[in-house]
Amino acid sequence: MILARLALRNLLRQRRRSLLTLLVLVASFTALSLAGGFMAQTFQGLSDGAIRGGLGHVQILPTGGLEGGEEGSLEKALEGGETLAAKLRQDPEVAEVLPRIQFMGLLSSGPKSVAFLGSAVDPTREAAHMAVADRVKEGSKAPGGAGSRWLSAQPEAREVILGIGLAKSLGATVGTSLTLMSTTKAGSLNAVDVEVVGLQDLGLRELNDRALTVSLDTAELLLQAEGARSRLSVVLKQPQRADAMAERFARELPGTEAHPWHQLAAFYQQVRMLYFAIFGFMGLVLFLVVFLATANTLLMSVMERIREFGVLRATGLQARQLVALLQWEGAFLGLAGSLTGFVFTLLFRAGMNALHYQMPAPPGTSHGYELFIHFVPMVYVAAFLFLQTTLQLSALLPGLKAARLRVVEALRHV
Amino acid sequence: MLQLLNITRTYEAGGEKAGVFDVSLDVPSGQMTVLAGPSGSGKTTLLQIAGLLDEADGGEVRLEGVAVSTLPERARTELRLNRLGFVFQAHNLLPVFTALENVMLPLQLRGLSTEEARHQAEAALASVDLTPRLHHRPTELSGGQQQRVAIARALAGRPAVVLADEPTASLDQAHGAPLMDLVHRLAKERGVAFLVASHDPMVIGRADRVARLVDGRLVALEVRP
Ligand SMILES: Nc1ncnc2c1ncn2[C@@H]1O[C@H](COP(=O)(O)OP(=O)(O)OP(=O)(O)O)[C@@H](O)[C@H]1O
Ligand SMILES: [Mg+2]
């Protein structure tokens, strides 16, 4: 502990130099923690978006259901999917099961017809667990205007929610009557008249131009589905169990495959890879800057203290204790840099968040979002450990230099 | 008691040999032995070998009857910490520590608790009359006071031997003489073997034994009653 005290005094002796070094450390910590916080926030947003956008935590599909190439309605389907859903809801780890049907067809306003991609969902259960209902119902701010609402729970209601692009191409708004046309499960043509009750903005232009949502009862009538479902979105009580539960479902349910949400959220995966690459590069640059700056400072201070080290060694300090002394100096620099950097991060964060800055829409998405830097303790701990590791490495070189000094030569130094 | 047996340490410089050659010398406890000789005669070289700071090319150093010169560096450092004390010409002290902290440092390195170390360091500083200066930093002390702190540091751990290289060289006569009187008295009181390298007649005049070196060789050993 006496070495720690000596290290601290040495840093305080070279106040100006220590402050300059500290500046580098504070800047690095702040940069890392803000970037890390922004990254964590983005991941959180994207994963929430994927899970609450319909995937749930685990998706159960018929075997081969991911490969596509479906020609008719419900060609690849979970037969008795509704029954399976009811059974899975009894599982103690499952919070909810949302069966859904994916189907294709034509949507007609009479004079004009447009191809669509349909999703059929359970209006009540969906609204309780997914974000889509909220987006449709947001009063006058909703894409469909003040009169829009989510699908009603009445089994006999024949209603549709349209992507904003799809509505535009048909000139439809809330209240418009349209006709859905598709092939039934058995392969014959069928049509159902529906009323538009709301519009939705799914965030992706391509989706908004094609997507529509109806109730399972409406789809059942149109497709003659007889309880078959395309997939089940499972919401878990403990989200972090997604991987384990997917494995369990795959094992226990023959004729199906099950995937945790992140395997199916391609966008999430890509952004994650991209951010990790950017962050890794930034980390490397900061590592070099911090390493060189602190190694230089510590080396300079070693050169100035050669005589002192000679006396210390003469009076019985072991060579390895000189290495330890330099490591203490690095550790104190890192601690001071991290603490100050943390305060800076909090101030900066408060300032940025108070600005309510609007970020532009990311590529492929249709709307921007407000910048909000989250408080992420993990990121601050990581930035602290990063600085400490870097400093321990950069203190090693000066430390070994000090330890290798021959005592008699060091004593001759003035 | 420190014994030097046939110590040889040679430096080759420009075809000429320098250093110390075949020096044997006893440094008894409770006495002040002075290594005297002109500049370049090998005083520092011999002192550093005796203090286990440097290794001889030949010969042996015995500390309290045990051959210590062949021990590995780690063990020699440990002996310096536990059995030896050092006083150099100047810049003996850590500038960032107070007088008290400088004296406490080797005690704490030995594993003494802060309380024990403080207690012993205060006693050592009292024995060199520095009680009123405990919390001064070296820059706030005179040269003579700094040397007294160094002596207190060397003595605080109750060493067997204290080695001093030109301890008065950076002091004037008025400060040097009382310092050496103090060293002489403490050597007696504590039974410590003091080995002092110096060409200062004032220092030599206060010695119990004077070993004279010329060109690295011991030419005379004067033992005073
Ligand atoms: N590291 C070294 N390399 C080469 N020669 C050295 C070295 N150290 C000492 N010498 C030589 O050894 C001889 C003895 O030097 P030493 O320092 O022991 O003398 P000294 O008696 O202490 O002199 P002074 O009174 O000036 O301090 C000198 O000739 C010196 O030049
Ligand atoms: Mg000398």
Image (cartoon, coloured by chain):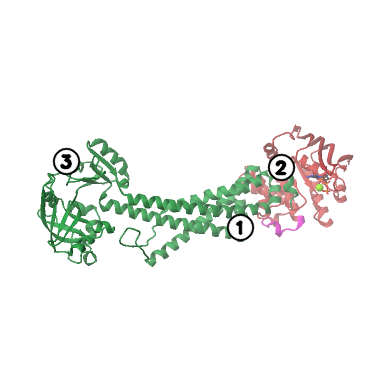
Chain colours: A green, B red
- Numbered disc 1: secondary structure: helix
Could you tell me residue B216's position as x and y percent? 86, 41
In what element is the residue under mark 2? loop
Q: Where is residue A143 drawn, in percent x and y? A: 23, 64
Kind of residue sitting beneath label 3: Glu
Q: Marks 1 and 3, Cα distance to the nearest angstrom? A: 75 Å
Residue ID for mark 2: B158
- Observer-nearest of B35 and A263: A263
Q: Chain of mark 3?
A: A
Q: Are marks 2 and 1 in contact (CB under 8 Å)?
A: no
Q: Please tell me how many numbered marks the rendered image carries.
A: 3
Q: Mark 1 CB in 8 Å range of ligand 2?
A: no
Q: Nearer the viewer, residue B216 or B155?
A: B216
Q: Which residue is mark 3?
A: A79
Looking at the rendering, which quadrant does residue B49 occupy?
Answer: top right
Chain to which the residue tagged by mark 2 belongs: B
Q: Position of residue A14 (x, y in %)?
A: 63, 58
As drawn, the residue found furthest toward the top would be B66
Question: Which mark identifies residue A149?
Answer: none
Q: Amino acid at mark 2?
A: Arg
| N-term mark: 1 or 3 | 1
